Image (tube, rainbow, N blue to C red):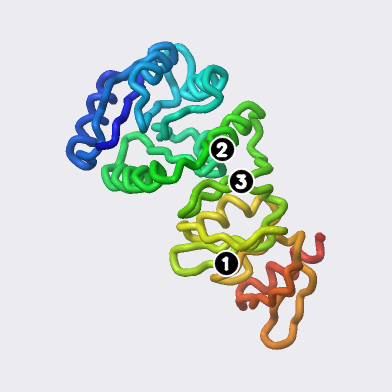
Amino acid sequence: MITALLIDDDQNLRNGMKGLLERYAPEIHILGEADSVKTGIEAIDKWKPQVVFLDIQLGDGTGFDILEQLALKNGKSSSHIVFITAHEQYAIKAFRFSALDFLLKPVDPEELQKVVEKIKNVLKQNDGYAHIDLLLENIRKKVDNFKRIALSTSDGIHLFEISDIIRCESEDNYTKFYIKNSKPIMISKTLKEYEEMLTEHGFERIHQSHLINLSYLKSYIKKDGGYVVMADNSNLPISQRKKERLQELLKTI
């Protein structure tokens, strides 16, 4: 069994979440509940759950306040955090860049099951909670032009400067990251997800299988159907429909 705590200031939502967990994730055992920042911290200290399902908006503050205070007291949270949130775009973006799990209200049973499966793997890894530190760093700054990204692999969480990512390559439902002064790493998310995250950081999708950081583009070669040469000396094809877009971008660099 995986021990868990529910923190939400709405009793009806806590009851609904308990019902969903009982039906779709019976391996989760709810130790207790809390409805505020104050009672949430007390409950975490008392129960020391493996997982905390944490609402962002609480009556006396936010779920981020709980993480901040736990960090001040203990240096880190000893629990795996799953945020439960409405459609708060800034928070969702921060979660994605920090590789943190979140569920949107109303909670979808299928998404809940996916998160629980991920929790089972994460609890085996002891990832050091560096991604929580990254989340708090981004929340404190209150800017959405994040400089670092957390990537979750089979052996833990890895933090990288976005500016060090040379390119990303699709391999079925996985994405391989090629990073400056680092070995390539494989992430179990699609290239489309990272395209959405990284486009505003100077990345461009040039092919179904390739997303490149334009800062590392060395050459655009028109012959042989068109391809680019990257700083890691890789030659990557350009799809026909992306050629005009890439040529326009190169004029602005």
Q: Quadrant of the N terminus?
A: top left
Badge 3, how many Cα within 10 Å: few under 14, some, many 20+? some
Tell me where residue 180 sits by quadrant: bottom right
Q: Is residue 146 above or below residue 40?
A: below
Q: Position of residue 58 (x, y in %)?
A: 42, 18
What residue did someone put label 3 on? Answer: 159
Residue 41 visible, this orientation: yes
Q: Is residue 96 left or right of residue 140?
A: left
Q: Is residue 46 above or below residue 242?
A: above
Q: Please name the residue shown 36% across and 32% down the image.
A: 50
Q: Identity of the amino acid at label 1?
A: Glu
Q: Position of residue 77 (x, y in %)?
A: 48, 27
Q: Identity of the amino acid at label 3?
A: Leu
Question: Which residue is most to the bottom?
Answer: 224
Question: Which residue is most to the left?
Answer: 23
What residue did someone put label 2 on? Answer: 130
Between 204 and 168, the one lying in front of the other is 168
In terms of sequence position, does the residue under pointer 2 or pointer 3 come before the other? 2
Between 87 and 132, the one lying in front of the other is 132
